[in-house]
Image (cartoon, rainbow, N blue to C red):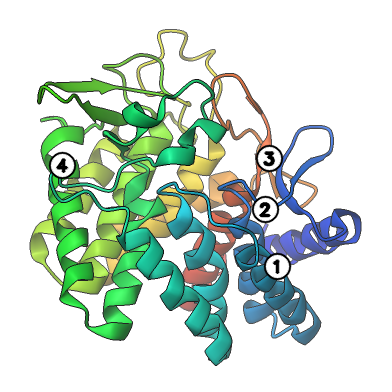
Amino acid sequence: MKFREALERLRENALSTLSESNGRFPIYKEREWKMSDGRHWMEPFWCGLLWNLSYFFNDGSLMVRAKECSIALSSKEDLSTHDRGFKYYYSTVKGWEITGETKLKELSIKAVQGLAEMFNPSLGFIPLGNDFSSYFPGEPQDTANREFIVDTMMASLPLILWGFSQTGRQDLLYISLIHSHKTFDLLIREDWSTYQAVRVESSGEVYKHTHQGFNNESCWSRGQAWAIHGFAILYNYTKMEFFLKVAENLSNYFIRNLPPDLVPYYDFNDPSIPNALRDTSSSAIVSSALFDIYNYTGDEKYIRKATEMVRSLISEDYFVDGGLKHSRYRQDEAKDAELIFGDYYLSEALIKAMKWGIEG
């Protein structure tokens, strides 16, 4: 399948989903789409997918729906979680980049401030936040406010860095640099695999663990993917070579541990491999990031691998009815599903590939 055809199928799928969403936000699909009402971290990727498709196909009617989606999402109460960055970066920020509409930028700038206020200077990171228990019931607020996860490299920092690029506010750059260095120090192992979570106790003791992976010492593939893409974005905004080297080393670990068809298992260290479940969303996130890393480094191995990964994702094994199947949300929910952010990052990777003249 050519890359343009894959994008056309993604558009057909999105139009079908629009007709049944009735103003709600699709987050994942098993037999049918599970819809949310504005309080889930996946929702902005639906807006982002509509923006990507409307931009690529120059589709004015789809652009209207993307804007409606972004405005509707921004009107919902902001939860006090690090995922607030996802909410705006992939909806109003993306919309402003495409349309230049002042309202979208204003909403985004306001959101930057709220997210920046979550930063804890004494701990040196953006914590999960008071409302994190909405994703992991039973997570006490005190615990959540002393913990950060590798996901934050994408859930928070891109919005804050975008805010810095628009305002020049040095405090936003400071937050990004301190948090990213804390991530490097505590969440990245010597072999360039990642932990998902770190909790700093009031005693100062550090506890490294996972909410998502196989066990505390394993490497959850999507956590690795968030780190790769996050450090690549960090380099894009700061041009600090250290962050690019981190992104490259994290990528190299990911690539080394891929199975032959280049679609990772949910956890690289799951002892049930090769019978473990896959996570196509992780591959989509990383393939998009690898196109950027190639752009920054000129190293052709990254564009080759990104292209090979995308080709695998749009094969009949994984791409069905215009959606990216066989993603895994978490251990106990949507274990083998189509995730809206998987579709989003696949669209992002396909568009980047075609910008480089790669047709598939």
Disc 1, SS: helix
Q: Residue at x 47, y 26 (%)?
A: 265
In the rendered view, does 102 fall on the left or right side of 51?
left
Three-letter residue code for mark 1: Ala
According to the picture, the residue beneath numbered tag 4 turns out to be 123
Quadrant (top left/top right/bottom left/bottom right) for the N terminus:
bottom right
According to the picture, the residue beneath numbered tag 2 turns out to be 38
Q: Quadrant of residue 190?
A: top left
Q: Are marks 2 and 3 in contact (CB under 8 Å)?
A: no
Q: How many angstroms separate mark 1 from mark 3 (CA)?
A: 23 Å
Q: Position of residue 168 (x, y in %)?
A: 22, 83
Asked if residue 96 is positioned above or below residue 70 in the image, the reply reads below
Foreground pick, 302 / 15: 15
Three-letter residue code for mark 2: Gly
Q: Nearer the viewer, mark 3 or mark 4?
A: 4
Which is more N-terminal, label 1 or label 2? 2
Q: Tell me the crowding category of disc 3: few under 14, some 14 to 19, or many 20 or more residues within 10 angstroms, Cα based.
A: many
Asked if residue 64 is positioned above or below residue 236 in the image, the reply reads below
Which is more N-terminal, label 3 or label 2? 2
Q: Tell me the crowding category of disc 4: few under 14, some 14 to 19, or many 20 or more residues within 10 angstroms, Cα based.
A: some
Three-letter residue code for mark 4: Leu
Q: Position of residue 200 (x, y in %)?
A: 19, 28
Three-letter residue code for mark 3: Glu
Which is more N-terminal, label 3 or label 1? 1
Q: Can residue 356 be seen in this snapshot?
A: no
According to the picture, the residue beneath numbered tag 3 turns out to be 338
According to the picture, the residue beneath numbered tag 1 turns out to be 72
Q: Are marks 2 and 1 in contact (CB under 8 Å)?
A: yes
Q: How many angstroms separate mark 3 from mark 4 (CA)?
A: 36 Å
Which is more N-terminal, label 4 or label 3? 4
